[in-house]
């Protein structure tokens, strides 16, 4: 073939590959408010930065007459590398217009190739999912393909950041790759994740359920905690992926990028001086504390609607990326329960994997009591959070704003879990338990059989005595269990100075294969 002809052929083949399943199918996607795989990649990457791989790869399946049917170049997935804000990423996007984006042996090979390149070149990998699951015609080949991907997800975990966007169906075995990655973003009303679809559910459990109720974005960001962010549409979903990435380093050997800020490091946070209500049973919103202290008030919250009694998310202090964990007194008084423990433990571990310092705000009345929590394994789940904080070797700065009681005090990045800088506001109460509960236990014998009014009076006096003794930070400060009692308005300054002082922190772990976190 002469040069001109061969070039022509290349252009034709490229055009064919870029068409995916064809204009009609892309139109159908658009009508549903969805983008095509290539449109998503264009939205995600810096303009003109995409380097495509395996554009001409086709499947080898001969079952069910597949060898006689049209073979789509690329086989239902677009893969390659590019940049986001100038930083290298590897990416794959399933193309629903080709056999429903179903996963073939070939598609799995393409995904594995970019995952291997991402690990070799120490850059994040982003998967844009939109698939009907294992390609039914391929059977076991598709299963093997999925498992090859899962294996790589696990090997890459803690080495490079892995992000998943769910932009359409994600069913059956397809769900496990996102579940193994660090963060999953879904799109409301246009994406769903479940192991078994409504028909199988009906035949096994006799439940009538639609896809949205079974595995829509609301389900996974409010009930199951499987997904971390629910976007209103595909554009927002892509933006969430970029926002997440901006707080992360390229890999576990690098530091997160520093972003210049105009916000003075010593800005006094005066509103915080009157943040804590005089009544200890009154709530306030810990997010007001967070946004007041972080650079430019920008807090990127994650899993806002799941276990809202604990708040997690990313922000920056003096340009330095941090992970924030904060009890939320405005929801269930900020108590720690099973979901809150799991949510925060996983986040602490993510930050530790990728050298992102932890800033913890504590206002916690304790662990949630009761059979629901005990039967749900609060002992094991609470221990996960404790384990995660103890294991974390990144800088750990902790601010106790009000309550810090009992086991929850120990767990929330306490000094004894190798907290680096533990500060308390003057309003902090660091004790074994709240005054009311404590005096009822300690004085049960004294009030037994007494007239209820008199008993109440005795208990109120004892509670006052208990609170005067313990409901302050100075007992803990007197032992060195908190490093300093600070004025709330100084919070931003002290956090930033602390993080700067800790930037060369180095901890040598004991030699071991890996710990055994109580999963
Ligand atoms: C092959 C598939 C496919 C699949 C969809 N298609 N899913 N082809 N294997 N898994 C094809 C359809 O035949 C159709 O082809 C095109 O993709 C679009 O599908 P539609 O059904 O027309 O689209 P829609 O109405 O939007 O419905 C989407 C859907 C549905 C809900 C995802 O297609 C569906 O239920 N698919 C099967 C889901 C599933 O059960 N997957 C297997 C899971 S088991 P044409 O030619 O008409 O355009 C699994 C086990 C793996 O994944 C375990 C690993 C550990």
Image (spheres, grey):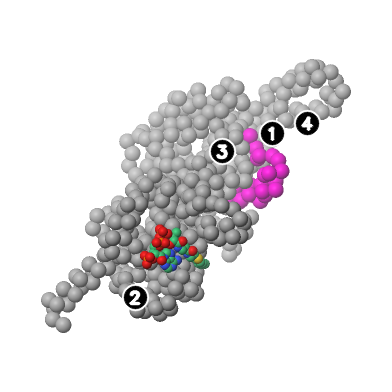
Q: Is residue 25 visible?
A: yes
Q: Secondary structure at mark 1?
A: loop
Asked if residue 371 lies in the magenta stretch, the reply is yes
Are the residues tagged 4 and 1 within 8 Å (C-beta)? no
Q: Which residue is tagged 2?
A: 69
Q: Which callout, 1 or 2, points at the residue further toward the start of the chain?
A: 2
Q: Which callout, 4 or 1, points at the residue further toward the start of the chain?
A: 1
Mark 3–mark 2 distance (CA, rounded to whole Å): 54 Å
Are the residues tagged 3 and 2 within 8 Å (C-beta)? no
Query: Residue 83 — which label?
Result: none
Q: Is residue 447 above or below residue 234?
A: above
263 horizontally vs 488: left or right: left
Q: Which callout, 2 or 4, points at the residue further toward the start of the chain?
A: 2
| Label 2 C-beta lies within 8 Å of the nearest ligand 1 atom | no
Residue occupying the point 58% across, 30% down: 402
Q: Is residue 158 visible?
A: no
Q: Secondary structure at mark 2?
A: loop
Where residue 298 appears, as percent x and y from the top left, is 39, 38
Are the residues tagged 1 and 2 within 8 Å (C-beta)? no
Mark 1–mark 2 distance (CA, rounded to whole Å): 70 Å
Q: Secondary structure at mark 3?
A: loop
Asked if residue 23 lies in the magenta stretch, the reply is no
497 horizontally vs 85: left or right: right
Q: Which residue is tagged 4?
A: 441
Mark 3–mark 4 distance (CA, rounded to whole Å): 27 Å
**Outermost residue, bottom side:** 1
Whereabouts is ligand 1, in terms of quadrant?
A: bottom left
| Label 1 C-beta lies within 8 Å of the nearest ligand 1 atom | no
Query: Residue 433 — which label?
Result: 1
Q: Which residue is tagged 3?
A: 309
Where residue 282 appears, as percent x and y from the top left, is 58, 25
Q: Which residues are magenta?
A: 364-388
């Amino acid at each position: 073939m002469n040069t001109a002809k061969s070039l022509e052929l290349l252009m034709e083949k490229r055009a064919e590959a870029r068409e995916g399943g064809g204009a009609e199918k892309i139109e159908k996607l658009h009508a549903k408010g969805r983008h095509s795989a290539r449109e998503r990649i264009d939205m995600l990457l810096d303009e003109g930065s995409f380097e495509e791989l395996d554009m001409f790869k086709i499947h080898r399946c001969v079952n069910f007459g597949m060898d006689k049917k049209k073979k789509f170049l690329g086989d239902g997935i677009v893969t390659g590398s590019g940049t986001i804000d100038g930083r290298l990423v590897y990416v794959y996007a399933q193309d629903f217009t080709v056999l429903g984006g179903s996963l073939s042996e070939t598609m799995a090979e393409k995904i594995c190739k970019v995952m291997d390149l991402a690990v070799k070149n120490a850059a994040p990998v982003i998967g844009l999912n939109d698939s009907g699951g294992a390609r039914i015609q391929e059977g076991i080949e598709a299963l093997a393909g999925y498992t090859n991907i899962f294996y790589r997800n696990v090997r890459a975990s803690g080495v490079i950041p892995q992000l998943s966007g769910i932009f359409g169906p994600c069913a059956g075995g397809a769900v496990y790759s996102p579940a193994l990655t660090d963060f999953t973003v879904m799109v409301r009303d246009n994406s769903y994740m479940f192991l078994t679809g409504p028909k199988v559910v009906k035949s096994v459990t006799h439940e009538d359920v639609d896809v949205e109720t079974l595995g829509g974005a609301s389900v996974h960001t409010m009930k199951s905690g499987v997904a971390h962010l629910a976007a209103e549409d595909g554009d927002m979903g892509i933006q969430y992926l970029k926002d997440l990435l901006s707080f992360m380093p390229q890999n576990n050997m690098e530091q997160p990028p520093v972003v210049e800020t105009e916000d003075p490091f010593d800005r006094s946070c005066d509103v915080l001086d009157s943040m804590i209500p005089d009544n200890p049973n009154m709530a306030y919103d810990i997010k007001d504390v967070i946004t007041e202290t972080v650079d430019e008030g920008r807090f990127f919250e994650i899993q806002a609607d799941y276990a809202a009694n604990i708040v997690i998310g990313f922000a920056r202090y003096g340009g330095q990326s941090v992970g924030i964990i904060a009890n939320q007194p405005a929801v269930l008084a900020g108590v720690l329960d099973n979901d809150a423990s799991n949510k925060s433990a996983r986040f602490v571990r993510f930050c530790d994997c990728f050298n992102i310092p932890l800033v913890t705000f504590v206002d916690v009345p304790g662990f949630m009591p009761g059979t629901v929590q005990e039967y749900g394994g609060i002992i094991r789940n609470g221990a996960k959070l404790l384990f995660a904080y103890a294991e974390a070797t990144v800088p750990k700065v902790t601010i106790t704003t009000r309550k810090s009681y009992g086991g929850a005090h120990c767990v929330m990045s306490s000094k004894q879990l190798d907290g680096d800088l533990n500060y308390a506001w003057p309003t902090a109460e660091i004790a074994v338990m709240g005054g009311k509960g404590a005096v009822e236990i300690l004085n049960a014998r004294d009030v037994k059989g007494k007239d209820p009014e008199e008993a109440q009076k005795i208990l109120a006096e004892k509670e006052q005595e208990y609170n005067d003794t313990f409901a302050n930070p100075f007992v803990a400060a007197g032992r060195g269990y908190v490093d300093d009692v600070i004025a709330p308005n100084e919070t931003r300054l002290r956090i930033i100075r602390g993080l700067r002082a800790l930037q060369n922190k180095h901890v040598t772990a004991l030699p071991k294969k890996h710990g055994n976190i109580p999963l």
